[in-house]
Image: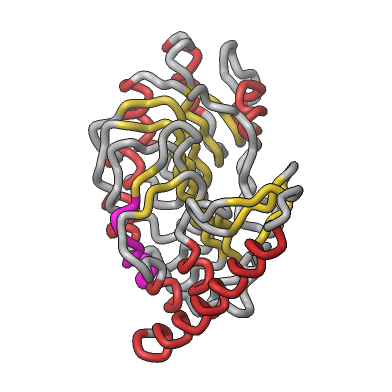
Amino acid sequence: MKHHFGDFLDRADDYWTIIPNRERFAFIADSVIADKDNVKILTLSKSQSKEHWEQVFDCSNLEELTLHNPCREQVKAICKLTNLKRLRVTFFRATDIEFIGDLINLEEVILEYVSGFSDLKPLQRLTKLKSLHFENIRRVSDFSELAGLKSLRYLHIDGTIDWKQPIENFEFLKGLPNLEVFSLGFIINRTEHPALLPILHLDKLKKIKIGRATFKTNEYAFLKVGLPDVEGCDWDLCWEYNDSFEFLGKRAGYVNKNSKNSRKRCNEFIATFEEMIEEAKEIIKYCG
């Protein structure tokens, strides 16, 4: 699926200050930069001449860089930019992401359509990292190397509508003590219920963003019980959508609003969900 260039970052707080995706080309260095000392944001692409993109190393106050469909020479060279605070990489096939690990002052990182690598360990060197956005990183399914990012406050993991990002398990959440926002898009969960049990370790969690059909229904019941004060845990059980009532949960089904059994079906689903609530209470009592 073609990248949307939209901006789906949660900018309600101070998690993200990086420019919106659609603004990236306004900062591309395709001519000589006159006042390099005042440059704080740049975009590099392999379409630029070497003469123009290498100006990035003369911009001593640069804070933010977008690598949009870059060449390998550009990616390899940015390890010199150790003062960078914000980095976006889009459309790049990387054998590894060691180049990111050298940028020790990074606070915000976005990887979109970056494929070929599977090891997230270089991110552990980013001790100032507060916000991390993954979208369509196709070789990754093990996110355990995120554990230990003690400064991380915002995490989003996503695929696309036609390719869902696999996640082996959510144990890594135990190692993110300061996480405040946990957001999931198009993902495939590979763990049995309760897959999100580790989320109970997030004492500072303020908000979750999870779609209605991401998990089976019992995971939503678990979250509702386990995270009573966290924003985003109040889903409609029978969501009115067009001519139907859609039930909460992956493959939970729906009923036509005009069906003579619509009220009965909704009430049955609500009753089932209440049973799941009780089951979740027992799980949390003995395992939480």
Please check the rendered image and state whether residue 22 is part of the magenta-colored stretch, yes or no.
no
**From the viewer's perspective, is 117 left or right of 28?**
left
The residue sitting at 38% across, 63% down in the picture is 149
Q: Is residue 83 visible?
A: no
Q: Is residue 114 left or right of residue 271?
A: left
Q: Nearer the viewer, residue 216 or 223?
A: 216
For the point 65% across and 28% down, which residue is it?
A: 22
Q: Is residue 207 left or right of residue 241?
A: left
The image quadrant of residue 191 is: bottom left
Q: Residue at x 36, y 28 (%)?
A: 75
Task: Identify the image quadrant of the C terminus.
Answer: bottom left
Q: Does residue 267 lie above or below 161 as drawn?
A: below
x and y percentages locating residue 15 in the rendered image: 61, 56
Residue 116: x and y, percent? 27, 32
Judge by depth and name the residue closer to the eye, 112 or 250: 250
Identify the residue shown where x is 30% and y is 43%. 140
Residue found at the far bottom of this picture: 285
- The image shows residue 221 at horizontal and vertical percentages of 52, 72
Figure coloring: secondary structure
- The image position of residue 151, as x and y in percent, is 46, 65
Point out the stretch of residues depicted in magenta: 167-175
Residue 158 visible, this orientation: yes
In the image: residue 1, left or right of residue 172: right
Q: Residue furthest front?
A: 260
